[in-house]
Image (cartoon, rainbow, N blue to C red):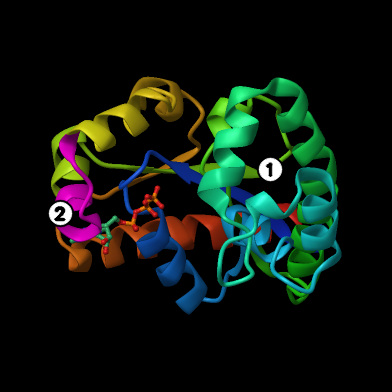
Amino acid sequence: MQNAKPTTLSVGLTGGIGSGKSEVLTRLKARGATVVDADLAARRVVEPGTVGYDAVVKEFGSEVVGPDGALDRAKLGAVVFADPDRRAALNAIVHPLVGELMAEWANSAPEGGIVVYDIPLLVEGGADRGYAAVIVVDADDEVRYARLLANRGMSRQDATARMAAQATREERLAAADYVIANNGSLADLDQETDRVWSELLALRDSTIR
Ligand SMILES: Nc1ncnc2c1ncn2[C@@H]1O[C@H](COP(=O)(O)OP(=O)(O)OP(=O)(O)O)[C@@H](O)[C@H]1O
């Protein structure tokens, strides 16, 4: 458990690239969930003016700073991708800060609230983080390709490489307590989200109230 208040229900949400996690999160938020976005936290803690930014620039030098003064994530990514020691150094700076910020967001949940942790690599991470339930957003590979190509301007090759670096659909589904199917329209997704939200409310009522 990531320091969520014991009076809230902590739920992990994951799904492959292009499955529709962001769309589901928007809908869960609209229904009253407190959303804790791991990727957003990882970006926030190294924004210019933060202690994280200063620590990263001190460690990696000004060559990882872009012309706008923000960290050049592509350059930093290339450095740490090539060298496990450098990756460990970056993680040692960033991980504790991300953990703190996520805990702060989780703690903003009201009593009896449902906290949804958006963790793209929840299944790949392996460790059981003590979520009361895991939600997997699921869509067929062809549907995901079509969305990534049409809405993200990604090439099929790029999408394939990213999918290959993630857990398989089967591995993800094996970790799921609830599956939100997202092969249809956004109106279908509203209904799927409603169904799972009702289940989460029932789980909340049976566990923390
Ligand atoms: N049911 C749907 N109908 C139409 N478009 C959809 C549907 N679900 C998602 N999309 C669109 O497909 C794209 C990918 O969805 P989204 O960003 O929610 O996926 P994601 O899982 O968060 O992706 P990533 O892992 O890349 O962050 C977005 O442009 C989104 O608006």
The number of discs equals 2
Q: Residue at x 67, y 60 (%)?
A: 41
Q: Quadrant of ligand 1?
A: bottom left
**Label 1, ligand 1: CB separation under 8 Å:** no
Per the picture, the main secondary structure of the magenta-coloured stretch is helix
**Marker disc for residue 184:** 2
Q: Nearer the viewer, residue 146 or 200?
A: 146
Residue 85 placement (x, y as % from top left): 77, 24
Location of residue 184 (image quadrant): bottom left
Q: Nearer the viewer, residue 58 or 40?
A: 58
Q: Is residue 6 left or right of residue 118?
A: right
Tell which of 30 and 141 is nearer to you: 141
Magenta stretch bounds: 147-156
Three-letter residue code for mark 2 = Gly
Is residue 30 in view?
Answer: yes
Please state, as top left, top right, bottom left or bottom right, where the N terminus lies in the image: top right
Q: Residue at x 55, y 45 (%)?
A: 75
* Residue 131 - label: 1
Q: Is residue 60 left or right of residue 140?
A: right
Q: Residue at x 62, y 66 (%)?
A: 70
**Residue 61 numbered tag:** none
Q: Position of residue 175 (x, y in %)?
A: 51, 28
Three-letter residue code for mark 1:
Tyr
Q: Mark 2 vs mark 1: which is more N-terminal?
A: 1
